[in-house]
Every structure is written in structure tokens, then in C-alpha cells.
Amino acid sequence: MRLIVPQALAVGSVVELSFSLLNAEQPVRAKAEVRYARELSSGQWAIGVRFTEMARTDAHWLVRLFP
């Protein structure tokens, strides 16, 4: 998953994420490993993450939304 963040994150670091899905009552909470980080012309950073921990139900919804 690609995210836009305000500061650089080290490749290999583990981050905790929380985000909402459409019509979801609870936010998705997950841990993910930073796989790449690239500075954008805006001064923000694009990072790619690989999920390492997530509730099974949240993973199910992500697969359904992003096949």
C-alpha cells in the first residue's frame, strides 16, 4: 500500500496504522513494515508498506475492496 506522509520513515521500520474504510464502524488497525520511501516535490514523502499484523476481518475487507 502506498501512503503519503509528512516526514521520511526509515525503510525496514515498523509503523502502526489506523484508517477508516467506507461504511466501517471501527477503523482498521494494523502494523506494517516500510518497504520504500521517496521524497515528493511537495516536500511530503511517499512510502510503501507491507502489512505484518492485522485482524482477520480487516484483512478480509481490504481484499474485497482492493482485489
Image: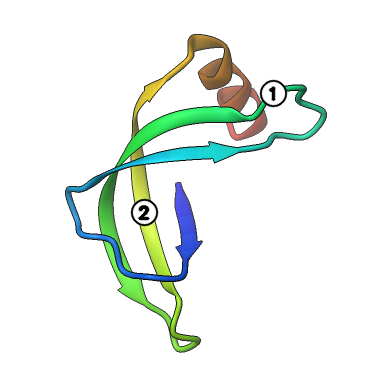
In the rendered view of the protein, which quadrant contains the C terminus?
A: top right
Whole-percent x, y for residue 10 in the image: 20, 59
Q: Residue at x 51, y 20 (%)?
A: 59
Q: Residue furthest top?
A: 56
| Residue 9 image position (x, y, % from top left) | 28, 61
- Mark 1 in CB contact with mark 2 (< 8 angstroms): no
User: Relative to 48, does residue 38 appear above or below in the rendering?
Assistant: below
Hey, what amino acid is under mark 1? Gln
In this view, 20 is above or below 13: above
What residue occupies the far left of the structure in this picture?
Answer: 12
Mark 2 lies on residue: 48
Q: Which residue is mark 1?
A: 26
Query: On the image, which quarter does residue 40 sit in?
Result: bottom left
Q: Name which residue lies at 46% across and 70% down.
A: 6
Q: Label 1: few (<14), some or many (≥20) within 10 Å?
A: few
Label 2, residues with CA under 10 Å away: few <14, some 14-19, many ≥20: some
Foreground label between 1 and 2: 1
Farthest residue to the right: give it: 23
Q: How did the renderer colour the structure?
A: rainbow
Q: Residue furthest bottom?
A: 41
Amino acid identity at mark 2: Gly
Q: Position of residue 29 (x, y in %)?
A: 51, 28
Percent of width and height locating residue 19 = 60, 39
Q: Which mark is residue 3?
A: none
Label 1's element?
loop
Counting the numbered discs, the total is 2
Q: Residue at x 25, y 51 (%)?
A: 35
Q: Is residue 52 left or right of residue 17?
A: left
Q: Residue visible at 66% across and 31% down?
A: 65
Name the secondary structure under disc 2. Answer: strand
Q: CA distance from mark 1 to mark 2?
A: 24 Å
Chain-order first, disc 1 or disc 2: 1
